[in-house]
Image (spheres, rainbow, N blue to C red):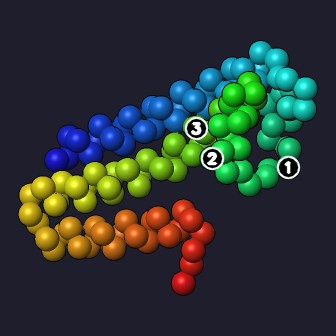
Amino acid sequence: MELAISFTLLGGVLIAAGLILLGLVRLVGGAPPGEPATVAQLLTQEVHATSLGAIVDGITSGRPTSLIRLGIFVLILTPVARVLLTWLLFLYEHDWTFAVITTIVLIVLVLGLLGITA
């Protein structure tokens, strides 16, 4: 169980790092019009909330900042994937006490990601 969880966390972090690095390399290599031309401009630009659909549209348009945003999104989802995997493993092992506790944690995480607060 610990091995599967550690591979999930490692995989999520490596995928996120790769996407962010690819976005930064494309940004330094020359940004399309309307995109920041340097990393310094990227860090000082106004940040707008984006949806997953907007990120995908930006990637298909070749915008490097969308790759960076996707990497950050994957990094944010990595702990959620870990909790989901733990929940599935507890269900598989019929450990109902920890399955219920993990269900509550998963619900709290998903509500937090959706911006729903108590």
In the current view of this chain or complex, which residue is farthest to the bottom?
Answer: 118
Q: How far across and how far down the image is residue 92, in percent?
A: 12, 55
Q: CA distance from mark 2 to mark 1?
A: 18 Å
Mark 3 crowdedness (10 Å alpha carbons): few <14, some 14-19, many ≥20 = many
Badge nearest the viewer, 2 or 3: 2
Badge nearest the viewer, 2 or 1: 2
Local SS, label 3: helix
Q: CA distance from mark 3 to mark 1?
A: 18 Å
Under mark 3, the amino acid is Gly
Q: Which residue is mark 1?
A: 46
**Mark sitting on residue 71:** 3
In the current view of this chain or complex, which residue is farthest to the right?
Answer: 33
Q: Quadrant of residue 53?
A: top right
Under mark 1, the amino acid is Glu
Q: Earlier in the sequence, mark 2 or mark 1?
A: 1
Mark 2 crowdedness (10 Å alpha carbons): few <14, some 14-19, many ≥20 = few
Local SS, label 2: helix
The answer to whether 76 appears left or right of 9 in the picture is: right
Q: Is residue 21 visible?
A: yes
Give the residue at x 75% y 27%: 61
Q: Which residue is mark 2?
A: 52
